[in-house]
Image (cartoon, helix red, strand yellow):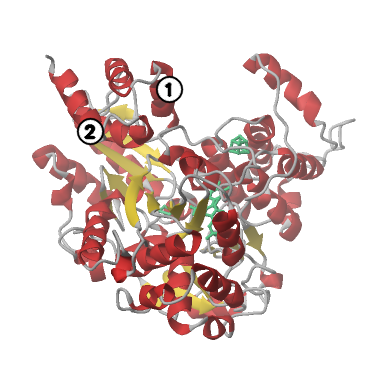
């Protein structure tokens, strides 16, 4: 029996030859063998008894999986906007020179691969890179060269960590150089809670009373869209199904967002406590934490916290001695796909499939993980839940604003003197936040990540809350020397890269918007281009299938709205060609249909977008 056959049998066996664990199987094969090659695909398909094409299509979908062999160690340098602002290009050149290869290549000895990657959740300590599972931060060209030399010598990325970060980053099971950069803690999320304290109170109530408390608190989901949590739980509880499921969305892929990483590092008990309360409230016995691949370095630590909770009977059978109440949590690691933050894509990924978003209805609350009614909530939402059960819904609702109660944990990065994590009351003015973070000369602030909006100084008196400037957490500050149109272009490139490609408005529209913007930034634009971009952007928002396509045009549309003179300065003052300014999506699609050899999908407005 060949080594590959033995390895794959063993890996598949570890996951009970269960096709729904294909993500774990493929990840394990990738780590063990450096790729999931054609032969491995065959072997996996046979072992778990699914068609080969299903394994193949999963492997091709995720950035951290590959059919072709990669180096023994893979260096993934973040090339998102914040890292670029802080010198990622120079760092990238140093890596490439020292390795003697270009990005996307592997050294001839097969030892090291070099790649670019979007935001890895370290925007407050950029430039940063992921070297296998090891995060390296505050990179410089010299450090990049040194890293390559060390990797050549030892082949072990863990040896790159010479100093440990603060808090649990220094925990023996984490051992990372990452800093929490908690600049302002708060009463809800970034505060201690004794394990079991909130769960005990929840278990003393009926599940319906727990849901009522959450409704009374007017808690809205912290993942971005702000859906009322109590209502989501009520739907899930009421839905018929063979078992129910609680999913914690720890995919945190929105560029500039890193607060969930800090919460998971410092307050994992609070998250798991919230999940157990959710399980009790909706009648679920299974919880899943979907942890983005970039945070795999936290996994062993999180597993140890889960184990300790099992020992304290805060997970497992008859929680805290309450007969018939069972709940446990497993961690599902992702494999590098931003779209998997979208809840239906995330559920597919947990089921061992590609992260393709699904049509709704049925909503996850009706039919989610393996057909079970499922509530998907953000990491921070679960923290709020635990605190509400501990301190009462009135205490929570007294904080923040009428439509946005409680606090919000923000991830602040970019041109400010104190980048990091801030827990603030909802309703805080953007101007006050900018003073707090040391960004008095900001000329634009991107609130809500790449899919959010660019806010101009004239609007800095606006407030951060669901009814005004909504954000899942990301606040990126741009100083006077930054080219905001290039920032918008960078975001557009991100969406083109991350689109799952299923529906045409998103797949084609994103490329068309990007091209037009490239022309404008290069000084080749025309006056009618702005109207074209607006019409195309609005069409994408209306007709894309999921939240990615529906929000992808936001950076362009909001910069046109708030910074029109910047665009106009870049545009050549040429007359508008006939028919150029108005956008006809059907005409634009015809060519792409010919190329793709299939007809286009155009959808009505869906649910689940983050900011609209
Ligand atoms: C492309 C895309 C990416 C998303 N990424 C995340 C994410 O990383 N974390 C998150 O909590 N929600 C994300 N969401 C929103 C989720 O679909 C979902 O609404 C959220 O997890 C619900 O949790 P909440 O109600 O607690 O906010 C994303 C949505 C879209 C469309
Ligand atoms: S909008 Fe369409 S193509 Fe874009 S990510 Fe969603 S489903 Fe995929
Ligand atoms: S880590 Fe590079 S932008 Fe977030």
> Relative to 225, does residue 431 appear above or below in the rendering?
below
Q: Nearer the viewer, residue 34 or 567?
A: 34
> Residue at the front extreme?
323
Q: Which mark is residue 112?
A: 2
Q: CA distance from mark 1 to mark 2?
A: 29 Å
Q: Is residue 318 left or right of residue 450?
A: left
- Label 1 secondary element: helix
Marks 1 and 2: which is nearer the front?
1
> Relative to 510, does residue 68 appear above or below in the rendering?
above
> Relative to 111, does residue 443 appear above or below in the rendering?
below
Q: Are marks 1 and 2 in contact (CB under 8 Å)?
A: no
Residue 166 seen in the current view: no
Image quarter (top left, top right, bottom left or bottom right) of the C terminus: bottom right
Residue 607 seen in the current view: yes
Residue at 41% of width from left, 41% of height from top? 350
Quadrant for residue 166, please give it: bottom left
Residue 51 is situated, as x and y percent measured from the top left of the image, at 40, 17
Residue 565 is situated, as x and y percent measured from the top left of the image, at 75, 56
Q: Which of pointers 1 and 2 lies earlier in the amino acid sequence?
A: 1
- Label 2 secondary element: strand
Q: Nearer the viewer, residue 411 or 297?
A: 297
Q: Which mark is residue 54?
A: 1
Residue 400 is situated, as x and y percent measured from the top left of the image, at 59, 80
Quadrant for residue 194, please give it: bottom left
Residue 213 is situated, as x and y percent measured from the top left of the image, at 55, 75
């Amino acid at each position: 029996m060949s080594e590959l056959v033995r390895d794959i049998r063993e890996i598949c066996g570890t996951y009970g030859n269960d096709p729904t664990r294909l993500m774990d199987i493929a990840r394990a094969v990738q780590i063990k063998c450096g790729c999931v090659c054609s032969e491995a695909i065959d072997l996996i398909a046979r072992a778990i008894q699914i068609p080969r094409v299903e394994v193949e299509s999963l492997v091709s979908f995720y950035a951290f999986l590959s059919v072709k062999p990669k180096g023994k160690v893979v260096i993934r340098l973040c090339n998102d906007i914040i890292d670029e602002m802080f010198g990622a290009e120079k760092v990238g050149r140093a890596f490439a020179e020292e390795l003697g290869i270009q990005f996307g290549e592997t050294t001839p000895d097969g030892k090291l691969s070099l790649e670019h990657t979007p935001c890895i959740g370290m925007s407050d300590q950029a430039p940063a890179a992921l070297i296998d599972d090891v995060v390296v931060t505050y990179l410089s060209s010299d450090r990049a060269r040194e890293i390559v030399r060390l990797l050549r010598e030892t082949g072990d990325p863990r040896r790159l960590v010479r100093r440990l970060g603060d808090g649990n980053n220094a925990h023996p099971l984490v051992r990372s150089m990452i800093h929490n950069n908690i600049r302002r803690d708060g009463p809800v999320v970034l505060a201690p809670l004794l394990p079991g304290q909130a769960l005990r109170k929840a278990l003393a109530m009926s599940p319906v009373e727990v849901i009522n408390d959450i409704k009374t608190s007017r808690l809205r989901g912290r993942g971005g869209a702000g859906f009322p949590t109590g209502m989501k739980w009520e739907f899930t509880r009421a839905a018929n199904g063979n078992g129910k499921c609680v999913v914690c969305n720890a995919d945190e892929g929105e560029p500039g967002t890193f607060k969930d990483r800090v919460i998971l590092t410092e307050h994992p008990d609070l998250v798991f406590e919230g999940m157990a309360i959710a399980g009790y409230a909706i009648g679920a016995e299974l919880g899943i934490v979907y942890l983005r691949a970039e945070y795999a370095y936290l996994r062993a630590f999180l597993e140890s916290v889960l184990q300790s909770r099992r020992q304290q009977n805060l997970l497992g059978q008859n929680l805290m001695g309450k007969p018939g109440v069972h709940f446990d949590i497993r961690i599902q690691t992702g494999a590098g796909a931003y779209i998997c933050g979208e809840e239906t894509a995330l559920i597919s990924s947990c089921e061992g499939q590609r992260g393709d978003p699904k049509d709704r209805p049925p909503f996850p609350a009706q039919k989610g993980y393996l057909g079970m009614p499922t509530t998907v909530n953000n990491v921070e939402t679960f923290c709020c839940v635990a605190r509400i059960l501990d301190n009462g819904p009135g205490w929570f609702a007294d904080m923040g604003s009428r439509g946005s109660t409680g606090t919000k944990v923000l991830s602040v990065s970019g041109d400010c003197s104190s980048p990091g994590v801030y827990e603030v009351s909802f309703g805080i003015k953007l101007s006050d936040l900018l003073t707090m973070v040391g960004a008095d000369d900001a000329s634009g602030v991107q609130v809500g990540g790449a899919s959010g909006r660019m806010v101009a100084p004239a609007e800095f008196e606006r407030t951060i809350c669901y009814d005004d400037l909504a954000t899942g957490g990301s606040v990126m500050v741009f100083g006077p020397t930054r080219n905001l149109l290039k920032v918008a272009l960078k975001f557009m490139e991100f969406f083109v890269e991350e689109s799952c490609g299923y529906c045409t408005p998103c797949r084609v529209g994103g490329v068309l918007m990007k091209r037009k913007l490239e022309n404008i930034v290069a000084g080749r634009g025309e006056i009618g281009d702005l109207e074209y971009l607006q019409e195309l952007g609005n069409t994408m928002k209306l007709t894309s299938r999921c939240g990615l396509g529906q929000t992808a045009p936001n950076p362009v549309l909001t910069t046109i709205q708030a910074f029109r003179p910047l665009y106009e300065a870049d545009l050549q003052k040429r007359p508008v060609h006939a028919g150029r300014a108005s956008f006809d999506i059907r005409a634009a699609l015809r060519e792409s249909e010919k190329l793709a050899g299939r007809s286009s999908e155009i959808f009505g407005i869906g649910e689940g977008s983050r900011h609209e």
